[in-house]
């Protein structure tokens, strides 16, 4: 069993907040703000575990991490808002539009054509909003 | 946005380990031990976030928390080992066998009869092992 | 195998209708009304099996049953209208807002952060509508 | 809202038991027997709602009903024992082996290739057991 | 292992386009058109594999195929747009409204009441649009 | 709508078989062989669409594609045999063990801890078999 080597909470929270800003940008801020009125502790958990612990691990670059997340959310097919946030995040960390649509198309093999179609239409919306922004 | 009020990591890890021991007993130890050879950091995350953060929150008693977990794992139907661990955990924190089977039967309404049947047969195994142990 | 001890259909239907009214209130009436134009028999099944059979069982109080249902619907993540009905139902049978959000937050452990986030935002909507109603 | 027109419980239970025997044969008896030691009431619910209410409805023949069930269980991918029971049931109500494998293959489109592959291998097992029985 | 007997791509694509038009009608055209701006290759895959390969197989009539698809999409519960397209497709290939609602109601047994309710309300929308069209 | 530019079926099948051999190695051969006795046409579809069409697309390297597949299959949690094949495939195309376990751990965020735990234990089995082979 691993001994307790977790960093101090300040650095873990700060590191998570930095990773969240880098990856999700404004969309991340909106999620944190939206949580303040319903479950503020959950905002802290979201910053600390996914972003402070997982995305901050050095073993996998953010490009690979966003491929994994876009694939999973497309395949699960029940988290459209988060899929859009991570399509945006994929662009933020350097994936091209074609790489993102390639990941989503591949999900037709593992989760079926409806999941891939809904993922592609989510990407279409995100890409279009980015052009006009 | 919440300010950083997370406890020191020692207490968070220690609190999680104590909660894990109370709730999952030996089954929890086995999971942590099994992780040591493949992903030791994940053992730490498992102790810190689910048990140190969530199960240690004061707002909901462990009995209610295990009802929630047994319901969710039965309904999802794709995590048989964890469902068995939490049926055992339900008994550990004071749920009766009939309360556990009532929660599982209710899942026929929300996730279908196969999910409930597979949950009931998981409970049957756990209860039988407990008798002979 | 159990012998046939089911109650008379009148009492089963009547018991289910009473349980539905107590638990789901107006939202339950709306579902039944909405079914009348598409599948009226299904309204009867909905009253008889989930409410006449399951929710009317004496072995588990309604508070525990709503914890189980909110947990399962949050974790499954594909039944937003029903999740909102049961967040409302949770309040109807005596759960506090904080208990409900605690159940939903716990689902981050079992079904991931997107499922918990979408559940929390559903709760935010239900709570806000209740304030203004 | 529909008025209470449900049949007497005797006929509902008896009709369900007859439908279960016709559709699932020995596999149905095994499920009912296995429930007796853990949740005997659930055996009654299983006979009454799925088989007494749904499968006994006159509007859809059993062949069509088993196509629907094999498709759904293949696509969901988390109820292997029930999928095998219904592949057997499909043969019992007159589907050919090729019709069953055609339904399962079609699920590659809607739920992905792994779901279809696991469904085909389940069918292979059921067909092989039937040859040697 | 099967030897390579796939037809020429012209006939496979043409056969798929013909099957798509027959089954999905205008809704199919809309999907193909919507893909042109985001992933045109995926339009080709959609025509070739699901429609050119699977729906064009002679072993199962289109009526049975749509029963399977409506059942699966209702049970999965995470692909509402595609479910509506296939409820429409079911009508196109000869299923009656009552047969379609019977398939959807049956999914309460395998995927729970919320999945069936959401499927029935999708059918209600499709049927209503058809009346007014 | 895309015009028909698909390659000749010979090259599509041959290209798929080559990609399958490169990615899945012996495990791929076993799947194809296992299909011969139940649904030989499905072996052809599996070679042609996932491997001949999707994995052969030039826009995304195989390393990225296996990250996507391992993420999706871990998150879905209902296709253990295929997850193991693709953990092996990840090693075949150049992912390190630590990169694979990092992808799987990340799924705790999107699909919950049970999905990640079951994925890690699948990886442990695959890695152990590789040592002793």
Image (cartoon, coloured by chain):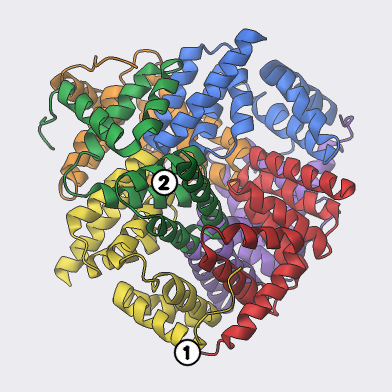
Chain colours: A purple, B blue, C orange, D green, E yellow, F red
Front-most of residues A110 and A88: A110
* Chain on which label 1 sits: E
Q: Quadrant of residue C27?
A: top left
Front-most of residues F1 and A27: F1
Q: Residue at x 72, y 58 (%)?
A: F27
* Chain on which label 2 sits: D
Above or below E38: residue F1: below
Above or below C36: residue A29: below
Above or below D113: residue C92: above
Q: Position of residue B15 (x, y in %)?
A: 76, 22
Q: Position of residue A64 (x, y in %)?
A: 75, 62
Q: Position of residue C81 (x, y in %)?
A: 37, 45
Left or right: B128, with D110 as reference point:
right
Q: Quadrant of residue E117?
A: top left
Which residue does the numbered mark 2 point to in the structure image? D87
Say if mark 2 contacts mark 1, CB within 8 Å.
Answer: no
Q: Mark number for residue E10?
A: 1
Q: Which image quarter holds the C terminus of chain C?
A: top left
Q: Residue at x 47, y 52 (%)?
A: D75
Q: Which secondary structure lies at badge 2?
A: helix
């Amino acid at each position: 069993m691993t001994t307790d080597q977790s960093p101090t909470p300040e650095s873990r929270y700060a590191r998570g907040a930095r990773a969240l800003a880098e990856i999700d940008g404004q969309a991340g801020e909106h999620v944190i703000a939206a949580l303040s009125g319903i479950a503020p502790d959950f905002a802290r958990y979201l910053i600390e575990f996914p972003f402070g612990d997982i995305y901050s691990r050095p073993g996998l670059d953010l490009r690979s991490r966003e491929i994994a997340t876009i694939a999973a959310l497309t395949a699960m097919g029940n988290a459209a808002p988060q899929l859009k946030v991570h399509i945006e995040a994929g662009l933020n960390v350097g994936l091209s539009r074609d790489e993102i649509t390639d990941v989503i198309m591949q999900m037709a093999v593992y989760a079926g054509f409806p999941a891939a179609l809904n993922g592609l239409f989510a990407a279409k919306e995100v890409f279009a909003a980015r052009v006009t922004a």
